[in-house]
Image (cartoon, grey):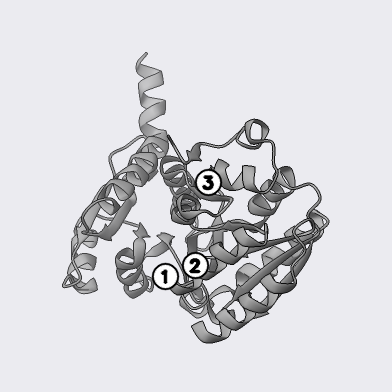
């Protein structure tokens, strides 16, 4: 028993040099960060140093605290955590998670794990629901989602799909493209993907237009935003927060052994759950009982 306890302690030791910093926010964000940290601690088998910071907190203050604790790797969560991690990246190994949209220029010095679902997971789910799909339309801001489109092209080829990705640099340009593609889309062969992209997917004007026209023309609209499913999008993928925490912890452990073990750059979300709108599925002529198999959330839920 003593030998086993000593082995477990040795395995957990690297986790003691890992810290997490995240923004001090109210619900539901507080609960999300707590679930991610629980996953991190479960994987590391130790209670990590976790610091909730306000917008007034300076990287110098946080850095001094981390030095006193002999922290070697910093996990930044959310935009607030990313701000601190980026400023301390010259003196600590850092990685960032739980951010919605990131320009590639922001991830040149360290890895950033976004909340944008992996295109491979989204498109395989689409093909399961809609085997006859042949084209997927996507309107995106290249500054925010150029990296995602590169992954999406490869994923589309794997699934036997044509990705029709069109660039838009403002909301008016996005609206024009959505109107054109929805007017000409084939309900049997085409689907429309709404990415996490504040330039091209405004939750008021753009979303209302796309969901209304998609419904009227029986075009499948799926989204990278969970909230859009409740409003009528066919399906979405969203974070499994505890599993995301475990994945971030595994990456952090690699950095403890080698601060250059991970390449810089933006990565999609692979630790996912799935949600479906069965009213939309029925409207599109899908077998609702079969369609909802394998989904964690089902809307409408009553």
Residue 28, image x, y percentages: 28, 50
Residue highlighted by disc 1: 204
Residue 105, image x, y percentages: 50, 80
Residue 102, image x, y percentages: 47, 72
Numbered disc 3: secondary structure: loop
Question: What residue is shown at x 52% (from left), y 86% (from top)?
Answer: 172
Residue highlighted by disc 2: 207
Mark 2 Cα-neighbour bin, 10 Å: few <14, some 14–19, many ≥20: some
Where does the N terminus fall, quadrant-wise?
A: top left
What is the spatial separation of the Cα atoms under label 2 and label 3, in whole angstroms?
26 Å
Question: What residue is shown at x 63% (from left), y 77% (from top)?
Answer: 179
In which quadrant of the rendered view does residue 40 lie?
Answer: top left
Residue highlighted by disc 3: 271
Q: In this view, does 296 lie above or below 91?
A: above
279 left or right, relative to 248: right
What is the spatial separation of the Cα atoms under label 1 and label 2, in whole angstroms?
6 Å
- Mark 3 or 1: in front is 1
Mark 1–mark 2 contact, CB under 8 Å?
A: yes
Numbered disc 2: secondary structure: helix
176 left or right, relative to 250: right
């Amino acid at each position: 028993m003593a030998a086993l306890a000593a082995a477990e302690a040795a395995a957990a030791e690297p986790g003691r040099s890992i810290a997490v910093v995240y923004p001090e926010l109210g619900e539901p964000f507080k609960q999300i960060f707590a679930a991610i940290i629980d996953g991190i601690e479960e994987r590391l088998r130790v209670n990590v140093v976790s610091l909730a910071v306000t917008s007034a907190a300076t990287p110098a203050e946080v850095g001094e605290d981390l030095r006193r604790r002999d922290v070697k790797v910093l996990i930044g969560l959310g935009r607030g955590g990313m701000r601190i991690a980026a400023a301390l990246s010259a003196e600590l190994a850092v990685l960032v998670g739980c951010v919605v949209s990131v320009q590639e220029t922001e991830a040149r010095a360290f890895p950033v794990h976004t909340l944008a679902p992996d295109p491979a997971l989204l498109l395989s789910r689409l093909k399961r629901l809609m085997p006859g799909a042949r084209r997927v339309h996507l309107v995106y801001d290249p500054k925010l989602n150029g990296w995602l489109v590169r992954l999406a092209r490869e994923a589309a080829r794997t699934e036997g799909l044509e990705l029709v990705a069109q660039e838009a640099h403002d909301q008016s340009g996005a609206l024009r493209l959505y109107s054109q593609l929805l007017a000409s889309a084939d309900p049997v062969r085409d689907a429309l993907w709404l990415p996490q992209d504040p330039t091209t997917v405004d939750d008021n004007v753009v979303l209302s237009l796309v969901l209304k026209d998609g419904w009227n023309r029986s075009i499948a609209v799926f989204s990278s935003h969970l909230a859009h499913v409740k409003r009528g999008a066919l399906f979405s993928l969203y974070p499994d927060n505890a599993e995301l925490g475990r994945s971030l912890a595994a990456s952090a452990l690699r950095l403890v052994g080698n601060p250059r073990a991970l390449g810089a750059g933006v990565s999609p979300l692979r630790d996912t759950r799935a949600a479906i709108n069965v009213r939309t599925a029925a409207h599109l002529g899908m077998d609702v009982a079969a369609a909802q198999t394998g989904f964690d959330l089902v809307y409408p839920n009553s």
